[in-house]
Image (cartoon, rainbow, N blue to C red):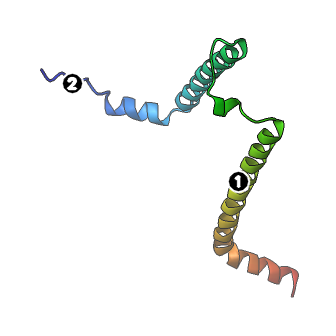
């Protein structure tokens, strides 16, 4: 038996795709569910009802600080590369405009 689900009509798909509340609502619901799950896991680990693997609880505050420093450095590097690529593209597009502005201020 080949039961197929009926597909929504084209206008309904387009209405769902272009409305401005569906995606943020889904993201908020997902964030709340993620919070509930991680909070329950955190409380269970704190109460001792959940035994975490040893590699998650080994180390001290200095080790955690080193990991966070490495993550922050990586994020800053990625942002710097993205902005440098963006600036190069912007310079290519706005080069003639900037040249005309420079001539206006420096006769």
Query: Nearest the camera: 62 or 87?
Result: 62
In the image: residue 32, left or right of residue 105:
left
- What is the quadrant of residue 11 in the picture? top left
Measured in 3D between alpha carbons, the distance from the residue under mark 1 to the one under mark 2, in whole angstroms, is: 47 Å
Q: Residues within 10 Å of mark 2 (few under 14, many from 20)?
A: few
Q: Are marks 1 and 2 in contact (CB under 8 Å)?
A: no
Q: Name the quadrant of the N terminus.
A: top left
- The residue labelled by disc 2 is 4
Task: Give above or below for 17 relative to 28.
Answer: below
- The residue labelled by disc 1 is 74
Front: mark 1 or 2: 1
Query: Nearest the camera: 107 or 79?
Result: 79
Query: Nearest the camera: 17 or 62?
Result: 62
Q: Secondary structure at mark 2?
A: loop
Q: Residues within 10 Å of mark 1 (few under 14, many from 20)?
A: few
Q: Secondary structure at mark 1?
A: helix
Q: Which mark is residue 12?
A: none
Query: Nearest the camera: 76 or 105?
Result: 76
The residue drawn where x is 58% and y is 20% is: 33
The residue drawn where x is 25% and y is 23% is: 5
Residue 58 picture location, percent across and down: 72, 33
Q: Name the quadrant of the C terminus.
A: bottom right
């Amino acid at each position: 038996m080949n039961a197929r689900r009926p597909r929504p009509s084209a206008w309904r798909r387009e209405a769902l795709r272009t409305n401005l509340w569906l995606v943020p609502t889904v993201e908020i619901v997902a964030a709340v569910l993620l919070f509930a799950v991680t909070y329950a896991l955190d409380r269970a680990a704190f109460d001792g009802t959940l035994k975490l693997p040893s590699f998650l609880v080994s180390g001290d505050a200095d080790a955690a600080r080193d990991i966070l420093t490495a993550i922050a450095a990586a994020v800053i590097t990625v942002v710097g590369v993205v902005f440098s690529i963006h600036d190069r593209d912007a310079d290519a597009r706005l080069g003639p405009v900037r040249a005309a502005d420079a001539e206006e201020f420096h006769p």
